[in-house]
Amino acid sequence: MNDKTFMAWPSRILFGCGELLSLAPLLQKQRFRQALIVTDKFFTDQSDIVVRLMESLASHGIGSVIFDEGEPDPSVALCQRAAERLSRVSALADIDHVIAVGGGSNIDLAKVLSVTLKYGGHPADYVGEGKIPGKPLALVAVPTTSGAGSEITPGAILVQENSSTKVALMDNDLRPVTVVVDPLLTVSCPPKVTADAGIDALTHAIESYLTCDSMHFDRQGLADPGYSGRNHITQLMAAESIRLCFAHLPTAYRQGADVDARIGMAYGSLLAAFSYANAGLNAVHALAYALAGLTHASHGSTNAVFLPYVMQSLLPVRERELAHIGSLAGLTAASQSELARKAVIATRDLVAQVGIPVTLKDFGVTKGDLAGLASNGLAVTRLVKAFPIQPPRQAFEAIVANAYAGKILTD
């Protein structure tokens, strides 16, 4: 409870089935007049979500322009290409807000565009923390998956060409001002997307639950830090997210039309985002970025394969918390240490249950790749500094070796 808390949130959140259509009246009340909708081809070719949104906006006197060339794991090059194409749109000067529709990739792209369309320059100019010169265009996020959490975070994560990992734009002004979480928008997610997003949410919750304490987090002297370590509030939210993900992800994966499961995962994702978007993350994401650079596998799957092995590495310093994760997953044991070990196994088993590989071998990684994976993970210093074991190199090398071999010592 001895916290040093700094937290930032979107100013408005709409949550509930059918709440997509509550957005336009709110935007009208706020006197917005022209939207840029950032999405991808699925939502313009195979879904009616964007059409319904545009019709609702128009009925409230709000015009809209669409950019639908979003891609999974957006690159710096995509962000620049999008800005160049939008610069030729006649209505560009009238755009006063950006609405992102889709998963975390579309939201991250929209975050970057909210900066470059207002201030110009190349996306690479803003990589790092605190590089944005002022308030971006107002950003509204409409997530259609339950997992990424980008609708709450201060970061836009991008693939940098010719890089072994990912880069980030980080600023609290990149947090969307308004978020619409409508669980019905996730019903169309196929099982693989549901699994990737759901394990991503669980990863956010567990990592932020276990991360560095706020009293010891290195804010690097920033008055307005994007992340500031775990505190009592973030841990409460992370714990409830963990409970919800274990309870509802298997059903959402197997029976995508189950609305109760979709609502449960929507809450789980939102609460995980509230937690990690303030507490921050550490080893799982650092190593996942390195694995994505090597294999180009999806973000959720690269998180998933490392999650149980990172948990295992933290048994010596986070046993109490890991035992609580076990109880949140519905497990029982005769001792705290046994319950903590069971939590590691249950997490690994949940990953497998939703069809995601549980070893690096299954991603095509070879023994010769392991040293590079560990080194590239360690290079993501903004995450590594929050890992509870310092110095981290030996732990990272052990995590990578165990993830390759599928070695859970608690089996």
Image (cartoon, grey):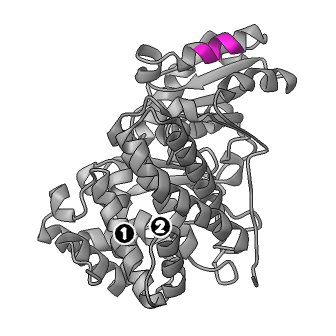
353 is within the stretch colored magenta: no
Q: Residue at x 64, y 78 (%)?
A: 217
* Residue 313, visible in the rendered structure: yes
Q: Residues within 10 Å of mark 1 (few under 14, many from 20)?
A: some
* Magenta stretch in the rendered image: 52-56
Name above or below for residue 342 compared with residue 261.
Answer: below
In the picture, the disc for residue 329 is: 2
Q: Earlier in the sequence, mark 2 or mark 1?
A: 2
Q: Residue at x 36, y 34 (%)?
A: 190
- The kind of residue on which mark 1 rests is Ala
Q: Residue at x 76, y 72 (%)?
A: 5
Q: Is residue 334 left or right of residue 372?
A: right
Q: Residues within 10 Å of mark 2 (few under 14, many from 20)?
A: some
- The kind of residue on which mark 2 rests is Ala
Residue marked by disc 1: 346
Q: Is residue 398 left or right of residue 364?
A: right
* Prevailing SS of the magenta stretch: helix
Name above or below for residue 148 compared with residue 286.
Answer: above
Percent of width and height locating residue 24: 74, 21
Cα separation, mark 2 vs mark 1, equals: 8 Å
Counting labels gives 2
The image quarter in which residue 171 lies: bottom right
53 is within the stretch colored magenta: yes
Query: Badges 2 and 1: C-beta atoms under 8 Å apart?
Result: yes
Name above or below for residue 43 compared with residue 336.
Answer: above
Name above or below for residue 1 compared with residue 378.
Answer: below
Q: Secondary structure at mark 1?
A: helix
